[in-house]
Amino acid sequence: MLHYNFYKSEHSSNRLLILLHGFISDSQTYTNHIETFLTQCNVLTIDLPGHGKDHSSTDKTWDFAFITEQMNQVLSQFEDYEFSLLGYSMGGRVALYYAIYGQYEIKQLILESTSPGIADETIRKERQAIDKARGRVLEIAGIEVFVNDWEKLPLFQTQYQLDDNKKQAIRRMRLAQNPNKLAKALRDYGTGNMPNLWGDIKRIKSNSLILAGELDEKFVNTAEKMSQEIKNHQIYIFKNVGHTIHVEDEAEFDTIVLGFLKEEQND
């Protein structure tokens, strides 16, 4: 079963907000948000396969069906709660898949800087090759070389504007990951190996909030396309931030997420 941490709300609430992190990260990425979220609901953080304190067997294939079954096992311990699911980037891809195929109903779905996969088969094959190549770098060169390269990706350029303490905290979390497990995660459930869900997201019944940062043009476009397919949705584009919204604008992120959850609770 996946490693998780449960945080009890300071108020009486039957809502459980499940938080899924991105690649080369872990549940610590939400540390600065948990106290705020607890003012309104209970919180559950999960370490996805190959990340943080996860101990998933490396003999298994960590595909989306495997992760969904592992999440089912975790959520089976919280059946008295109403589930809200928030996923960032890789975690958002898992969240999308779970909202369609998971055992438990997701009442509210929050998607931060994420995608339902790659529709074009040629581009998908190219991404699989990239994921495998990145996996080899992790296994051969090690975590520090990989992190140095990862931090130079255009996707994370807006993180250069963060204060030094935040940048160092992100770097420490990345360097703390296991390179061999990260390589397996890339091969097993990286973007290239994600099922193409573009034809399936119209089946999502959850009330959904789609988030993107305006400086992250690729994911703004993806967010707008998703908003045309997901029926019960709101979309919010954050000003002056990039891919990692919950890090680059913590206060606004919390305000928008809590506002959505409260609004849905009052409906």
Image (tube, grey):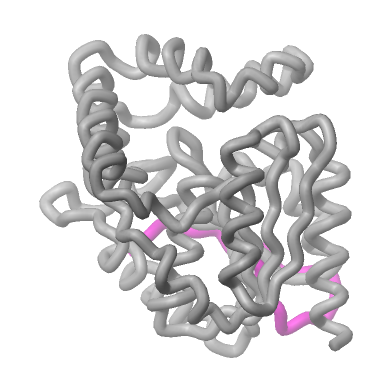
Residue at image position (86%, 74%) is 262
Residue 181, image x, y percentages: 27, 37
Image coordinates of residue 236 in percent, x first then y, are: 78, 54
Numbered label tally: 0
Q: Can the viewer see residue 128 in this picture?
A: yes
Q: Check the picture and name the quadrant holding the N terminus.
A: bottom left
- Say which of 33 and 229 sits in front: 229
* Residue at the extreme left of the image, as rendered: 59
Asked if 254 appears above or below 99 in the picture, the reply is: above
Magenta range is: 1-17
Q: In this orientation, which residue lies closer to the viewer: 31 or 207? A: 207
Look at 58% across and 83% down and name the residue there: 205
Residue 229 location, x and y as percent? Answer: 57, 70
Residue 103 on the magenta span: no
Q: Name the image quarter holding residue 243.
A: top right
Q: Is residue 3 magenta?
A: yes
Image quadrant assignment for residue 9? bottom right
Placement of 35 over or under 248, stated as above or below: below
Q: Position of residue 61 (x, y in %)?
A: 17, 55
Taking the image as drawn, is residue 184 in sight?
no
Residue occupying image coordinates x 41% and y 45%: 53
Q: Quadrant of the C terminus?
A: bottom right
